Image: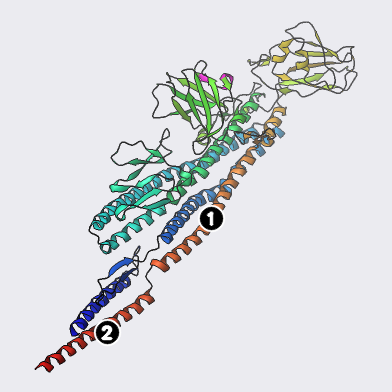
């Protein structure tokens, strides 16, 4: 009996010691990050003794996975908000407002229109035009700087992720080796370290974890790609840009392997990496392309309208802004020797979309042109075009549209060679003033209308609409003039019949122009097609009487004329910025420059606020998951203190059993003497 009591007491002391050690370990690791509370479990043997205990971690894997998932979502929105708030504040700042610069530009244009012969007011217009370009460039530079910061952070995050991936793989090997000798309790510290590495990786990106053989954990990206595999194999992140080296993409590759890199979908990565890429793709790139698009559209519209006027020197107007040309970026897989450059086709600013573009050669002389979104996905239907004399523009399109681009091709392309054109990306920083001379602002119209003094009616010719000063009807000079001389228009006896004469014809051309007597030259062109090439047209206002005579001549000396200036001013109210690549039949699909800028600022603000709201929501979920996880796996000091006291008492009681066994044994010995 005493022998059995001794064994039971001894096993009780041993088990109590193990319990005290486990409790002491829990208390000591109260503030250790990643530590999972442990518990030692014993079984009673058939002889009444306590078997050797097994120390296990108190871990609920479902709670752990939920916590990692919520952490990925929280850090995604936290990173997005941290980055987006800077851009939102900069765009919302009154001193950075591009709308203020645009309004000031048009206000000074109005002053020039009020005093068209004043060189002072014209100079103020060019001063404000330069300020507008400087402001657009400053905003674009802000975006470009943020893109550089994103690239730097992406490299850092990718390096951190690779460290965690490699660490998880290494710990898997250690755990597998311990599993081979069936001593799981010895691996608890390594389990904690691995779980901490997985949690740290979850902060960077969404991860999915599966159980492998021998206690290993197989880790996959939330997008499905394998990060840590069996037998110690793992993938690593690399950041590359193809074709744009400044637009880095996250890819996966097998370390020291020959597998082709796998593209990751940044929209589903989550974590800090996903938030960083989402900020770039949803805020930076759209802001950059939209700034470039609206700046180019406005510059082109003002160039085209200024060309239709007459400047203060009496010459036909020219360009006010110089629209840049950009070199296309070839993909690394290209095999040909071709090089592409692109600019805006003059007069096609309204066709330009707020996208990048991909050009694919389907042969040496044919291409496919695609508008691509922030993620490199094709938007709308691709266009096809021929390469004519080394150029692609609206005239060489065979289906679809050129999106406002004029592309020059040099060298010899190979079939399937691809190029990416980022025309909008830096346009706002590279547009410049073509001229700063006040005389070059073409406020006057190059034509003027006269009615004969002896006319019987009050009818008159309208101001006229000039559509093309490079057409055959104009002679650029110097001095400039109507190429075919003044035009004479006489009402004949027939109610709808008129006679038109110019230097070219020498004799009158008779034609009819029924009410409402609009587009008179177009009506005359039905008899003599040359009248359609004059580059302008006009209406008859009122009802002329037989014999009434009118004339159209070049506006020589008309420096107080502001008709073309009014058309320049009206650009502010015109929808010249294209809204969508694809639009419904009922959608006008264009907006004013001010509306486009307001929409840009609003879009940045809305996305930032949405992300901020989502961050608050997921932060609350993450805290709930953390609380749930800690309630199961965290160390509770009160509970451990209670256990410590209980196990001390158990130890003391077991010691008393041993003492009782000793007394019984001594009694037996004494009885035998």
Left or right, 246 with respect to 41, comes to right
Is 394 contained in the magenta span? yes
Q: Among all residues in the image, which is located at the extreme left? A: 673
Tell me which residue sits at (55%, 41%) in the image: 135
Q: So how many labels did they put on this image?
A: 2
Q: Position of residue 530 (x, y in %)?
A: 71, 11
94 or 383: which is nearer to us? 383
Q: Position of residue 625 (x, y in %)?
A: 46, 62
**Label 1 vs 2, first from the N-terminus:** 1
Determine whether the residue tagged by mark 1 lies in a helix, strand or loop.
helix
Determine whether the residue tagged by mark 2 lies in a helix, strand or loop.
helix
Q: Position of residue 518 (x, y in %)?
A: 80, 21
Residue 124 numbered tag: none
626 or 86: which is nearer to us? 626
In the displayed structure, would residue 422 be above or below residue 158?
Answer: above
Is 433 contained in the magenta span? no
In the displayed structure, would residue 59 be above or below residue 583?
Answer: below
Q: Say whether residue 590 is visible.
A: yes
Image quadrant containing the C terminus? bottom left
Left or right, 421 with respect to 506, comes to left
Categorize mark 1 by other alpha carbons within 10 Å: few (<14), some (14-19), many (20+): some
Q: Residues in magenta? A: 391-396
**Gap in Å between the C-alphas at discs 1 and 2?**
56 Å
Q: Position of residue 500 (x, y in %)?
A: 79, 11
Left or right, 581 with respect to 505, comes to left
The residue that disc 1 covers is: 614
Q: Say whether residue 116 is visible.
A: no
The residue that disc 2 covers is: 653
Image quadrant containing the N terminus? bottom left
352 or 563: which is nearer to us? 352
């Amino acid at each position: 009996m005493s022998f059995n009591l001794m064994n039971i007491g001894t096993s009780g002391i041993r088990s109590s010691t193990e319990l005290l050690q486990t409790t002491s370990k829990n208390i000591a690791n109260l503030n250790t990050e990643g530590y999972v509370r442990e518990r030692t479990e014993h079984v009673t043997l058939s002889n009444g003794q306590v078997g050797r205990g097994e120390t296990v971690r108190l871990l609920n894997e479902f709670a752990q996975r939920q916590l990692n998932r919520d952490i990925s979502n929280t850090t995604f929105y936290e990173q997005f908000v941290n980055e987006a708030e800077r851009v939102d504040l900069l765009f919302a700042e009154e001193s950075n407002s591009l709308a203020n610069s645009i309004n000031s530009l048009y206000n000074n244009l109005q002053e020039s229109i009020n005093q068209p012969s004043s060189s002072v007011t014209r100079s103020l217009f060019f001063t404000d035009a330069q300020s507008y370009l400087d402001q657009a460039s400053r905003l674009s530079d802000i975006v470009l700087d943020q893109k550089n910061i994103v690239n730097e952070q992406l490299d850092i995050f990718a390096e951190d992720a690779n460290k965690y991936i490699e660490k998880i793989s290494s710990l898997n090997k250690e755990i597998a080796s311990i599993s081979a000798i069936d001593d799981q309790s010895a691996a608890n510290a390594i389990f904690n370290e691995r779980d901490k590495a997985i949690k740290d990786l979850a902060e960077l990106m969404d991860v999915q974890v599966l159980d492998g053989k021998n206690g290993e954990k197989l880790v996959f990206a939330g997008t499905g790609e394998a990060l840590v595999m069996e037998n110690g194999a793992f993938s690593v992140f690399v950041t590359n840009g193809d074709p744009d080296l400044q637009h880095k993409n996250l890819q996966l590759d097998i370390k020291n392997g020959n597998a082709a890199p796998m593209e990751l979908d940044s929209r589903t990565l989550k974590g800090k990496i996903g938030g960083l890429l989402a900020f770039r793709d949803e805020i930076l790139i759209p802001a950059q392309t939209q700034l470039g698009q609206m700046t180019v559209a406005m510059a082109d519209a003002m160039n085209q309208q200024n060309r239709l006027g007459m400047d203060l020197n009496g010459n036909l107007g020219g360009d006010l802004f110089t629209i840049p040309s950009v070199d296309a970026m070839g993909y690394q897989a290209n095999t040909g020797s071709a090089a592409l450059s692109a600019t805006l086709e003059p007069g096609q600013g309204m066709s330009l979309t707020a996208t990048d573009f991909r050009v694919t050669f389907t042969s040496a002389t044919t291409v496919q042109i695609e508008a691509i979104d922030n993620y490199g996905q094709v938007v709308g239907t691709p266009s096809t075009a021929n390469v004519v004399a080394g150029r692609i523009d609206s005239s060489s399109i065979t289906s679809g549209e050129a999106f406002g681009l004029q592309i020059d091709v040099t060298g010899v392309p190979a079939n399937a060679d691809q190029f990416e054109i980022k025309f909008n990306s830096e346009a706002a920083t590279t547009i410049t003033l073509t001229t700063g001379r006040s005389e070059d602002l073409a406020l006057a119209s190059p034509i003027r209308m006269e009615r004969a003094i002896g006319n019987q009616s009050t009818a008159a010719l309208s101001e006229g609409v000039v559509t093309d000063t490079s057409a055959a009807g104009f002679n650029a000079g110097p001095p400039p003039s109507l190429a075919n001389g003044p035009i004479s228009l006489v009402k004949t006896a027939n109610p709808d019949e008129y006679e038109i004469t110019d230097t070219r014809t020498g004799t009158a051309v008779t034609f009819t122009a029924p009410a409402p007597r609009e587009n008179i030259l177009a009506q005359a062109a039905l008899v003599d097609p040359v009248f359609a090439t004059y580059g302008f047209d006009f209406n008859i206002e009122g009802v002329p009487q037989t014999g009434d005579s009118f004339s159209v001549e070049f506006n020589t000396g008309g420096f107080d004329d502001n008709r073309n200036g009014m058309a320049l001013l009206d650009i502010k109210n015109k929808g010249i910025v294209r809204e969508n690549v694809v639009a419904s039949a009922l959608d006008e699909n264009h907006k004013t420059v001010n509306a486009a800028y307001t929409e840009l600022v609003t879009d940045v603000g809305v996305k930032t606020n949405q992300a901020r709201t989502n961050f608050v929501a997921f932060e609350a979920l993450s805290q709930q998951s953390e609380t749930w996880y800690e309630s199961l796996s965290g160390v509770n000091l009160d509970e451990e203190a209670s256990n410590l006291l209980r196990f001390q008492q158990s130890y003391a009681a077991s010691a008393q059993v041993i003492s009782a066994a000793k007394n019984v044994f001594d009694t037996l010995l004494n009885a035998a003497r």
